[in-house]
Every structure is written in C-alpha cells, then in structure tokens.
Image (cartoon, helix red, strand yellow):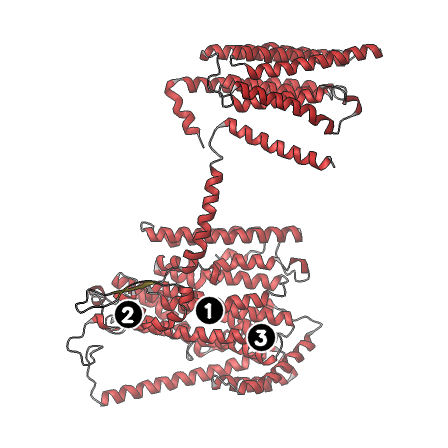
C-alpha cells in the first residue's frame, strides 16, 4: 500500500512535469495546430491524474477523469480545429509578445512558481508534490498566452491552459470534495464552449470584410 | 422646492434637493441658444452637484451613525459634530458663501430676470435654510461659530467689493447677493457662537436678524432683479456703461429700483435696516459682553459696517449709471417703460419692503418661534439662562450709550433693559421685541420726516422757478454723453482698494508726444476665484484624468495584463506580510 502510493506519487510528479513541458511547447510554437495539440495533450494528462491520486477509484472519480479527458482532450480541441478551418488561419502572425520572449517569460514564471511555493502556507502532505508549482506555472502560461497572442484561437487556447492550471490546483481538494471538482470540470466545459461560440462568432464578423467596423466602433 | 422644506427623512431630502437643483439648471438655461447661458448653466450644475456630493456624504454618515434616515433633533450625540463641516460645505455652495460662490454671478446674470429673482430671492436661501436647520438639530463643533462668522464677514466684504467693480448690472446684483448671504451668515455665526458660550441673549438677536434678513433679502433682491429685468427688456443690454438717463424714460422702474436699492443698502426707513440692525445689536452685545466671543464679534461688526458703506457706494453707482445722467447709447435713449404686468409684482414687493420696514413687529412672533425651535431653552437651565442674559445685557448698556450709532438703538436698548429686569418678561424674546417695536416707531417717524423734508424741498424749488437743463451741463460748450462718469471710473477709487483680490485686467495706452495717437483705457474684472483658483485646479485634474484615461483603449490583452499585474501586486503584498 505504502509502496503503491509512493509509485503513484512519482508518477503524478512525472505527469505534472510533462504538463509543464507542454506549457513551454505551447508558448514557443507559432503554429496553431501545434498549440491545440499540446493543449489537448495537457487535457488528457490532467484527466489521468485523479485516477492516480485516488488509490480506490470509485465511479465518481472515474467520471471526473472521463469528463476531463473527453472535454479537454477531445471536444474543445475539435471545436477549435473546426473554428480554425472556418477562418482558414493556422498561424499566429503578429503576437504582441514574441515567441522567444514568451518562452523566456514562461520559463521565468515556472521558476518563480517553484521558488514561491515554499512560501505558501500548504499542508505537509502537499509540500513535496509538484501539484502547486505546476498549477501556478500553468496559470502563468495561460495568462502569457492570453496577453501575448492576438489570434482569437490562440487566446482561447490560453484561456483553456489557464483553466487547466486552476483544475490542477483543484486536484489538491479532490479528496475533500470530489463532487465539487466534478462540478467545476463541468462548469469549465460549459464556459469553454460558450466562450468558443462567442469567439468564433467574433472571428467570423471580424474577418468578414464588411463588418470590421463593428469592432472598431466597439472600442471604448 | 417645498419638498425640501417639508421632508423629515434624509433620503427624501436628498432626492428633493436634487430635483430642486436640476430644476434650477433648467430655469437658468431657458435661453439655451446663447453660449454664455449654457456655460453658466453647466457651471451651476457642476458646482451644485459638488454640493450635493457633500450632502450625500453628510446624510450617509448621519444614517450610518444614527442607524436610520429619519431626521430629528440629535443634539446629545457629540460624535456627530464633525459632520457639520460637510453640511456647511454642501449648503454653503448653494447659498453662495464667498469662496464657494463661483456659480452664482454667471448663473444670476445669464438667467432670465424673473428666474434670477427667484434664484436670488429664494433658491440660495435654501442653502441658508439647510445650515440653520442642521446646526439647530445636530451638535456643532466648537469652532463652528467662529468659522461661520469669519466666512460671513469675508463674503459680506468681498462680495460687495466684487459687486462694486462690476459693469454688468445683473452681475452686480448677483455679487450683492453674496454680500447679503454673508450678512446672514454673520448672524448665524453669532448665534452659534453664543450657543457654544452658553449666553443666548445676543445670539438670539443675531439669529433673529439673520432670519429676518433672509426674508428681507428675498423681497428687495427680487424687486431689484425685476427692475433689472425691466431695464434689460427696455434696452437690451446689461452693460451699465451703455445706459443712463433712464429715470426720464422709465420713472416707475427707476423709482422702484431706487426703493429696492435703499432697502438693500440698509438705510433706515426700509426693511433692510431692521434686520441688519438686529444683527448689529447682537454683535454689539457680544462685544460688550467682554468674553472671548467679543474678539470675533468686533471685527465682524466693523467689516459689516464697511460692507454696508461699500453697498451704499455700489448702489449709488448702479442707480447713477443706469437711471441718472444722459443716455449713453441710442438704445438707452429709446427705452420704454415696462407694462402693468411687469410693474405689478414690483409694486407688491416694494410694498413688502415698506411694510416690513415700517411695522417690523408684525414678523416678530414668527421670528421668536423660529429662534425658539432652533434653540429650545433647556428646562433645567431656564432661570439660569434668563439671569445670565439679564446680567449680560446690563453689563452691556453703558458701552452702548457711548458709540450710539443711531439714536433709536439707544432708546430701544434702554427700554429693553427695564423690561428685561422684570423676571416676568420671560427672557430674550420679549427683550428684543421691545427694541423692535420702538424701532417701528422710529422708522415711521423717519419716514414721515423724510416725506416732510421732500415736500418742503420740492416747494422751495418750485418757488425758486425750476429750470430744467441737460445733466453735466457744467459750462461746457458741447457736452456729450461720453463725458459722464463710467461705472468703472465711478467705483475706481473704492475698487482700487480691493485690487489685490479683484485682479482687474487693464488695457492702457497713455497719451504722449506732441501729436498723440488715440489713447485707450479699459478695465475688466474677471471672475477671480473661478479663473485663478478653481479653473487651474480643474485643468490639473483634467490632465491627470486624461492621462489615466489612456489606459482604457479596448485591447483585451492589455486588460488581462492589468488584471495580472494587480493580482501579482496583491499576491506579493500577502507574501511580504507572511515572510518576516
């Protein structure tokens, strides 16, 4: 039992490390399919985590895991790909923060997250886990994407990566209130799809040459 | 406006106050197609809202401290005292106390004359009403009396100084309103001061004077504004330097305006004298009391006297420029008398001025009950209070007979003393009523004397073969209207004393050389407080806000950045607190 928990702990840290690596990949790429792919891979990894954390997987934890994998790994990336095809754009052309600077910022943010975590008042059982710094690093990555990219699809990816970070943080509480986490995932999904809908609509308006004025008059 | 007076709930009061203020804006901008009118309206609206803001804070804090919006006497709770300053600022803006008067001249000058009359006569009194109401209900800070009296003296003196320097006669009347509000404030300040020192007698006199002056000013200022409106209607200009000689063309207007001017200056037979005299009486009693309050009452009385003298100069100038002399322009020469509908209200107001002046005892019961409501005599300290007053009065009299400004004052006071010495007289109200009654007789006597002197003079003149000639025909071959004093030159000496605050703008080209070119001398008094203090400050605020506004540009990414920066700052704050 102890040994099993130890192996799981190591596996969990490995997965979080993978997620952080995917963060950096997402920051460095200029190609939108690559961005979407790294985001969906991160979603799958996040979905696997609850199963590893709970030694006795009951049906609720399984449901959470499946919903996460289905939503973040398959459904949202699929929607994004569709949106991308609809507007025929697959590259971020004019980022506000360049790819190398954003990669550096992301790396700096990750280091800062690791450095700051010991300062936070955490429970002893979470102290040696990578969960908290990983969550912080992912949130920072999401924010950099949101700020630095002008492409709407890339911004949605940033939003979802930000959301992944919040989800990672929520995993700390999975033992205390699994239902809450479950509800959180479902809420995430709803909001994600909602925002997707709005943004796809906005893209269609923006790239329709007739209606560009709508956005300029929306200024202010 | 009536709602403001009748509600007893703070929230309702605020709503009513705001409705009243906005109505004022629409009244001012009735001639909204003129640029100056719109500017004046906006200035009024902005300052009025600044005042309402103070009042919102005032009522909000009051509600927080008392736990409800209901208003009522709350004199026991000393922690409410600092709120008085907020009320003073909020109502002071509406009343037009000197540094807060910036909206008043342009609003009064640019509104239609009947609206000016209403605003000056009634609307700015709402500010006074607010101050009186809340200083009566709430505990006031110890310094309140001093500050209100100092503000009043400043308003009175500087208001009339600005009035003296104006060329626009409606603006002159507006600044004169500032002066009168100052006089009222002196009275209220005296009352507050007296209350905080525990001797109520002279405070009651001052308060009674202030309240009476509210009414009187409402009457004669409305009369003057109606007169001004009539002149404006007849000639189409507000510049005094373009008028002149209107007494022949518009005798009714001229006579009624002169009556109003006599009243506003506070000369004996009319009502302005009564209320100012009561205030003087209160101040002199305070001086004679030889307490700490004497040190503020004496300068206030001196400044009040100075303001009165300047008011006389101001209205001598206004009357002389508008109605006497020869017409300076064609429009003045072709002026016509106003119709019956315009004359009627003026006659009614003049009647009020005369009535209040000749029979001031008529209003005394109302004044007594108002002053009593403002400051109910504590049941325990009644006898103490009465004795103290009587003592203070007795101590005061020997000093009074010395200066003796008007014989009436001395007569009134001596009778008042004998009356007050009897315990059955019932304290202050009866004590001051007697001088008022005496004053009524003196006023009647003076009026009769003046009428007799006038008739005598007229007979004498008629007997000596009256011959009419053009004004300023002092031996010149070809006198022209331009030779007359202008309004600027008439008031030049007196306004030069105040040039440190008036800051007149001068354009001057002197005559020099053997073949001199055209010489020019122009002088204009700006809105000094507005132009030199408020507007630069506002421009500064505008710069800062414009700089801050650049942060709002519509780029979503930057907004997220702001959020991140704010979050990071908050997080670092928390961390920094936890680290040591």
Answer with mark 3 or mark 1, whichever residue precedes in sequence.
1
Give the side of residue B257 with respect to residue B277, left or right: left
Q: Measuring 62% from the left and 84% from the top, which residue is drawn there?
A: B395
The residue closer to the viewer here, B251 or A214, is A214
Q: CB of mark 3 within 8 Å of CB of mark 1? A: no
Residue under pointer 2: B486
The lab-note entry on whether marks 3 and 1 share a chain reads yes
Q: Helix or strand or loop: what does disc 1 sit on?
A: helix
Give the side of residue A155 with respect to residue B235, left or right: right
Answer with mark 2 or mark 1, whichever residue precedes in sequence.
1
Q: Which mark is residue B295?
A: 3
Q: Chain of mark 1?
A: B
Q: Chain of mark 3?
A: B
Query: Image height check: is B397 above or below B125?
Result: below
Task: Tell me the quarter of the picture where residue B465 sits.
Answer: bottom left
Q: Helix or strand or loop: what does disc 3 sit on?
A: helix
Q: Measuring 69% from the left and 35% from the top, which residue is drawn there?
A: B574
Give the side of residue B440 with respect to residue B286, left or right: left
Residue under pointer 1: B156
Q: Disc 3 and disc 2: Cα gap in Å?
A: 40 Å
The residue closer to the viewer here, B547 or B458, is B547
């Amino acid at each position: 039992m102890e040994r099993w928990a130890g192996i799981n702990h190591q596996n969990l840290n490995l997965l979080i490390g993978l997620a952080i690596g995917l963060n950096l990949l997402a920051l460095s790429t200029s190609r939108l399919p690559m961005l979407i792919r790294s985001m969906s891979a991160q979603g799958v990894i996040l979905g696997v985590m609850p199963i590893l954390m709970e030694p006795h997987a009951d049906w609720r934890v399984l449901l959470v895991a499946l919903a996460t994998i289905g939503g973040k790994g398959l459904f949202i990336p699929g929607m994004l790909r569709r949106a991308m095809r609809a507007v025929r754009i697959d590259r971020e052309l004019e980022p506000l923060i360049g790819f190398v600077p954003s990669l550096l910022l992301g790396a700096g943010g990750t280091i800062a997250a690791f450095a700051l975590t010991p300062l936070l008042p955490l429970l002893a059982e979470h102290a040696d886990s990578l969960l908290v710094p990983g969550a912080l690093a992912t949130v920072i990555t999401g924010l950099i994407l949101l700020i630095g990219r002008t492409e709407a699809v890339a911004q949605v990816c940033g939003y979802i990566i930000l959301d992944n970070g919040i989800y990672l943080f929520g995993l700390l509480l999975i033992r205390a209130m699994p239902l809450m986490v479950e509800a959180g995932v479902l809420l995430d999904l709803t909001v994600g799809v909602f925002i997707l809908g709005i943004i796809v609509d906005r893209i269609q308006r923006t790239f329709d040459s007739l209606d560009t004025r709508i956005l300029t008059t929306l200024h202010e | 406006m009536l709602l403001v007076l009748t509600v007893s709930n703070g929230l309702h009061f605020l709503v009513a106050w705001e409705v009243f203020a906005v109505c004022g804006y629409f009244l001012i901008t009735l001639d909204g197609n003129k640029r100056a009118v719109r500017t004046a309206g906006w200035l009024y609206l902005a300052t009025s809202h600044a005042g309402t803001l103070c009042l919102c804070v005032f009522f909000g804090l009051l509600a927080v401290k008392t736990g409800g919006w209901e208003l009522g006497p709350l004199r026991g709770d000393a922690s409410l005292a600092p709120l008085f300053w907020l009320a003073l600022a909020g109502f002071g803006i509406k009343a037009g106390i000197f540094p807060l008067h910036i909206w008043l001249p342009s609003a009064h000058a640019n509104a239609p004359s009947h609206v000016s009359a209403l605003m000056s006569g009634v609307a700015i009194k709402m500010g006074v009403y607010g101050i009186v109401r809340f200083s009566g209900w709430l505990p006031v800070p110890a310094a309140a009396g001093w500050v209100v009296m100092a503000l009043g003296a400043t308003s009175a003196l500087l208001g009339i100084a600005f009035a003296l320097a104006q060329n626009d006669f409606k603006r002159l009347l507006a600044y004169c309103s500032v002066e009168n509000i100052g006089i009222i404030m002196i009275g209220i300040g005296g009352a507050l001061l007296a209350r905080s020192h525990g001797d109520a007698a002279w405070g009651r006199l001052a308060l009674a004077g202030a309240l009476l002056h509210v009414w009187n000013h409402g009457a004669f200022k409305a009369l003057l504004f109606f007169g001004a409106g009539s002149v404006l209607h007849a000639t189409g200009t507000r510049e005094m330097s373009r008028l002149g000689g209107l007494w022949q063309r518009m005798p009714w207007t001229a006579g009624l305006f002169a009556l109003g001017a006599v009243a506003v200056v506070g000369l004996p037979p009319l009502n302005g004298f009564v209320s100012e005299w009561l205030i003087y009486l209160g101040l002199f009693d305070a001086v004679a009391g030889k307490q700490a309050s004497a040190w503020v009452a004496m300068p206030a009385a001196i400044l009040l006297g100075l303001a009165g003298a300047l008011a006389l100069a101001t209205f001598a100038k206004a009357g002389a420029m508008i109605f006497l002399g020869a017409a300076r322009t064609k429009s003045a020469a072709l002026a016509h008398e106003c119709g019956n509908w315009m004359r009627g209200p003026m006659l009614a107001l003049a009647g009020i001025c005369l009535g209040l002046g000749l029979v001031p005892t008529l209003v005394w019961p109302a004044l007594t009950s108002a002053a009593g409501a403002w400051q109910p005599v504590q049941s325990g300290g009644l006898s103490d209070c009465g004795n103290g007053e009587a003592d203070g009065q007795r101590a005061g009299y020997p000093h009074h007979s010395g200066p003796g400004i008007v014989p009436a004052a001395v007569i009134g006071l001596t009778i008042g003393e004998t009356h007050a010495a009897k315990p059955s007289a019932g304290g202050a109200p009866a004590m001051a009523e007697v001088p008022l009654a005496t004053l009524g007789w003196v006023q009647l006597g003076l009026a009769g004397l003046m009428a007799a002197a006038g008739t005598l003079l007229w007979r004498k003149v008629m007997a000596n073969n009256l011959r009419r000639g053009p004004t300023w025909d002092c031996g010149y071959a070809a006198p022209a209207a331009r030779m007359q004093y202008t309004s600027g030159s008439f008031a030049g000496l007196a306004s030069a004393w105040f040039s440190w605050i008036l800051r007149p703008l001068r354009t001057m080209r002197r005559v020099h050389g053997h073949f001199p070119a055209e010489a020019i001398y122009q002088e204009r008094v700006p809105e000094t407080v507005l132009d030199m203090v408020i507007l630069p400050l506002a421009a500064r605020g505008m710069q800062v806000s414009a700089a801050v506004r650049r942060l709002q540009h519509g780029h979503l990414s930057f907004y997220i950045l702001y959020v991140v920066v704010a979050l990071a700052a908050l997080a670092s704050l928390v961390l920094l607190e936890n680290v040591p």
